[in-house]
Image (spheres, rainbow, N blue to C red):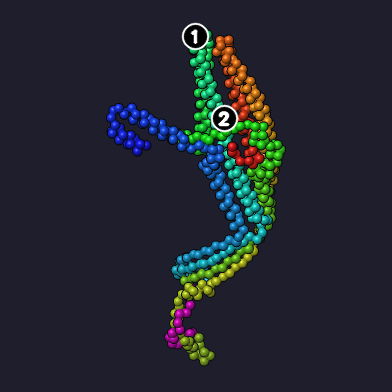
Amino acid sequence: MSLILFCIFMLQKKHNKTHTMKIKQLILFLILLLGVNSISAQKLWSLEECINYALDHNIEIKQQSLNLQVQQTNVKRSKASMLPSLSANASDVVNWGKSVDRYTNEFADSRTNSVNLYVQGSVTLFNGFQMLNTVKRDLSNLKVKEYDLDVTKDLKSLSITTAFLQIVYDKENLKNKQDQVRLSETQVARTEKLVNAGSLAKGDLYNIKSQLASDQAQLIKAESQLSLSYLKIKQMMDLPGDATFEIETPIIELTENFGGLQDPYKVYDYALKNRPEIKSAEAQIETSHKALSISKGGISPALTLSASLGSGFSGANQILDGAPTFNGYYPNGDMTGAGDTVFSPSFNYNYATKTWDDQIIDNRNYSIGFHLSIPIFNGLRTYTNISQSKIAVQQAELNLEQTKRNMRQTIEQSYADARSSFKQYEAAKLQVDALTEAYNYSEEKFNAGMIDAFEYNSAKIKLDLAKSQLLTAKFEYVYRVKILDFYYGKPLKF
């Protein structure tokens, strides 16, 4: 744009005033050309693109995806809980005062340092299959989360389709209103000429202008409705309200076989086997059964195997350091039978703390044991959990039946509405054709001064109403067909 304006500026400097008008015309032409190119370059969103964008940016879907990831970690945790547990421990302790050293079993009344090291592990051998059923329950819950995410995506896709169809309807409705306004404007111009020529009274002109004002009001209402519909779909797609957005308007021509209208019970049978709502409800039943098994496992004894390996070091663990030193003979207080004093040799002994490596080897200790826990009474918590789990199973089964019933009723109602709408469409189409002929005849008679503006407006209003009913029946049929396609597994597109 800047380059074009620069070129125009240079051309303007080189030409005299006689070319000023041509330069201005060139500027206007280029500006209009750029505007047209900008409009033509605007992206048009298809229904598939709207759905994909909404699915990628919807916060609820992102939250459910995170919930799915949380459940995946729950499955990993429950599987890992069946593995043995293993832990290592170490301590470094300094003692004052009198205490019994655990490695020498002797009293020590001086400051001593001790180090304890041990590794211990345990594994549950049996607990009423609670851990195994916990894994199965978490796997079922994972399926529930996956199907619920699919349900959310499908419902979002259907709501986007509904909003998209509303825009298509509003655009056609706006076109009808624009045609009505243009028709009324043309008729006002004709009537003014006829009034000026004395063929019609001024009252007829006022009536025609009144109809024009009414048509203009309907046009404004249609424009407002289209703007609101665009705002709604942008909000559903998480687009800013002031974002430039225009849909790719599909051409929808109704035929008797439009959309391949299926038998409702075939659609229902397909939905029972494939719809994520049903699969989610079925997985919820499986989850509740596994939860019941976990509760029942609470009345079973639990058997656990544990083992440990330990060692340590103590500063009080002393050993002889070197050979003893001879100090001579000293009386030991005993006497011989002859009355002589008994002498015993005396030695000096040197002690040192036993080395770390030797103590770690010598102080090794091992243990292995089985632990049996038998539940006797815990305030009826286990039996209460079993009762509640049984109720949860019944609730899940009822939820599945309710989901099936709701789906069947929705499919049956959509099929009935689709058939009814198509019949209404056919009737409205015949009515529009007939009223169009009647209107054309009334227009000719009005222009010839054979009828007044009231009769003319009456014919026009009837035609406008019939066109509106035709449009409503058309899109009601299209919407119901899309619902049936949705439950029959067909992609939502035009």
The tag earlier along the polypeptide, 2 or 1, is 2
Residue plotted at (49% across, 70% down): 313
Residue plotted at (48% across, 38% down): 43
Residue bearing the label numbered 2 = 169
Q: Which residues are magenta?
A: 316-333
Distance from disc 2 to disc 1, alpha carbons, whole Å, reads 42 Å
Neighbour class for label 2 at 10 Å: few (<14), some, many (≥20)?
A: many
Asked whether the viewer can see residue 58, the reply is no
Residue bearing the label numbered 1 = 197
Residue plotted at (66% across, 40% down): 488
| Residue found at the very far bottom of the displayed protein | 338
Q: Quadrant of the C terminus?
A: top right
Relative side of 290 to 12, left or right: right
Residue plotted at (45% across, 78% down): 351
Relative side of 306 to 264, left or right: left
**Under tag 2, what secondary structure?**
helix
Residue 319 inside the magenta-drawn segment: yes
Amino acid on which the number 1 mark rests in the picture: Ala
| Coordinates of residue 326 in the picture (x, y in percent) | 44, 86
For the residue pair 129 and 413, the one nearer the viewer reads as 413
Compared with residue 16, is residue 348 higher up or lower down, i.e. above or below?
A: below
**Under tag 1, what secondary structure?**
loop
| Coordinates of residue 474 in the picture (x, y in percent) | 62, 29
